[in-house]
């Protein structure tokens, strides 16, 4: 074999792996090990980024999403939840009676309280995330939601999760005046 062929073979054997190592593979490795979820990357480019941003810290997200609601959804539990929402839990003062984030204290909050009627948010957040936010409160900006983990029982907080879910449904029971306070 001629020397130039050996040189070409040697160059191919060395250059191709080096090219792959420093150009193509780092992007793949980064994508596989990137700590930001695809959900987060999609949110970054969304015009609703701040509205849809999760309030659960990234390090707690997996365990939080795995939480399962222990309270059945029915007229009785939703009625109890409404009493908590408009009474003991004081939720309505920030989120408003209809869950739109327009309560009497909403104007002084940054970030603004969640609008529970907003369908994209309802679809994106899990019951576990809502439960976590009620339990631990949310940090952010000048103010955030206070924690209710010491004030409300687990069952009461899960009941509120169900009630919050009803705000996102057209004709949901939370918007139904037949639920008595």
Image: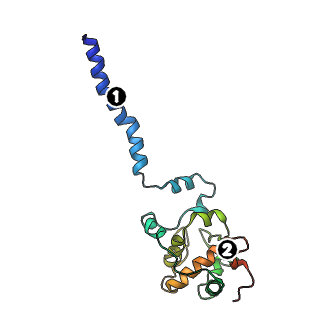
State the residue position of label 1: 16
Occupied quadrant, residue 102: bottom right
State the residue position of label 2: 167
Whole-percent x and y of residue 145? 55, 75
Q: Quick one: label 2, few (<14), some, or many (20+) residues within 10 Å?
A: many
Occupied quadrant, residue 6: top left
Q: Is residue 21 above or below residue 128?
A: above
Q: How many marks?
A: 2
Q: Nearer the viewer, residue 146 or 178?
A: 178
Q: Is residue 60 left or right of residue 97?
A: left
- Mark 2 and mark 1: Cα distance apart in space: 58 Å
Q: Nearer the viewer, residue 47 or 139?
A: 47
Q: Earlier in the sequence, mark 2 or mark 1?
A: 1
Q: Is residue 91 left or right of residue 28?
A: right
At a point 32% along the width and 31% down the height, the residue shown is 17
On-image quarter of the N terminus: top left
Q: Nearer the viewer, residue 70 or 22?
A: 70
Q: Is residue 134 left or right of residue 47?
A: left
At a point 66% along the width and 66% down the height, the residue shown is 118
Whole-percent x and y of residue 164? 62, 75
Q: What secondary structure is found at the residue carrying circle 1?
A: helix
Q: Quick one: label 1, few (<14), some, or many (20+) residues within 10 Å?
A: few
Which dot marks residue 157?
Answer: none
At a point 42% along the width and 51% down the height, the residue shown is 34
Whole-percent x and y of residue 181? 69, 89
At a point 38% along the width and 45% down the height, the residue shown is 29
Q: What secondary structure is found at the residue carrying circle 2?
A: helix
């Amino acid at each position: 074999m001629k020397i130039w062929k050996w040189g070409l073979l040697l160059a191919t054997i060395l250059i191709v792996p080096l090219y792959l190592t420093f150009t193509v593979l780092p992007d793949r490795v980064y994508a596989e090990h990137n700590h930001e979820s695809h959900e987060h990357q999609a949110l970054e480019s969304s015009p609703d980024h701040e509205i849809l941003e999760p309030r659960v810290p990234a390090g707690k997200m997996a365990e939080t999403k795995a939480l399962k609601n222990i309270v059945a959804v029915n007229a009785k539990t939703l009625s109890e939840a409404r009493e908590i929402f408009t009474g003991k839990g004081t939720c309505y003062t920030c989120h408003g009676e209809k869950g739109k984030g327009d309560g009497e204290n909403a104007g002084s909050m940054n970030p603004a309280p969640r609008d529970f009627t907003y369908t994209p948010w309802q679809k994106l957040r899990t019951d576990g995330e809502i439960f976590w936010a009620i339990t631990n409160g949310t940090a952010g900006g000048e103010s955030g939601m206070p924690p209710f983990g010491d004030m409300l029982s687990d069952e009461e907080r899960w009941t509120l999760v169900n009630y919050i879910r009803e705000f996102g449904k057209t004709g949901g029971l939370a918007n139904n005046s037949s639920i008595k306070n």
